[in-house]
Amino acid sequence: RGPVTSLDIAVQRPIIVTASRQECSVRVWNYASKECELSWRFPGEEPLAVAMHPLGFLAAVAFFDKIRVVQVLADELKPHRLISAKGVRLLKFSNGGHLLAAAKGRDVLMLSSRTLAKVAQFKVQSQQVASLCFHP
């Protein structure tokens, strides 16, 4: 098993999503039962970042050239949408789950989590974006 390179937690369900670049996989863990519930491999594609919707039914996975949004179901991760976005290294859903932020270099792209349409785009002036956080 490879190292975890990204992780996020759902607020409303006892689950954590992790990504491993070395394994090219994403796993969904139930921290109440301490078990891996779902696993999905992406042969030849390294997941760079993951984000879990606060309700725990959607997850976003960033790859080199795209963001894959998947539905987290009881027994599978079902592909939902594919967003073309190169170089995304950080993902974060807003506290209410209505927005998805994607950071690449000095740019932050804000997407509606319902439609996955671009809501806004910001450019940071000083340094590359190191982390994403929404104010409560």
Image (tube, rainbow, N blue to C red):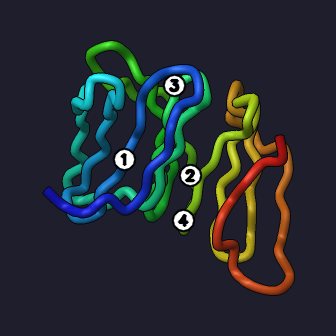
Q: Which residue is mark 1?
A: 18
Of the residues tagged 1 and 2, which is closer to the observer?
Answer: 1
Of the residues tagged 4 and 1, which is closer to the observer?
Answer: 1
Q: Quadrant of the N terminus?
A: bottom left
Q: Is 123 above or below relative to 5? A: below
- Mark 2 belongs to which amino acid? Ser
- Residue 81 seen in the figure: no
Counting residues from the start of the chain, the first of labels 1 and 2 encountered is: 1
Describe the element under mark 4 as helix, strand or loop. loop
Q: Which residue is mark 4?
A: 89
Counting residues from the start of the chain, the first of labels 4 and 1 encountered is: 1
- Mark 4 belongs to which amino acid? Arg
Residue pictured at 51% horizontal, 49% vertical: 67
Q: Position of residue 99 (x, y in %)?
A: 74, 37
Q: Residue furthest bottom?
A: 126
Nearest to the observer: residue 130 or residue 44: 130
Counting residues from the start of the chain, the first of labels 3 and 2 encountered is: 3
Work out how far the residue at label 1 is from the one at label 2, CA to CA, in angstroms.
Answer: 21 Å
Q: How many neighbours does mark 2 have within 10 angstroms: few (below 14), some (14-19), or many (20 or more)? A: few
Q: Position of residue 103 (x, y in %)?
A: 66, 63
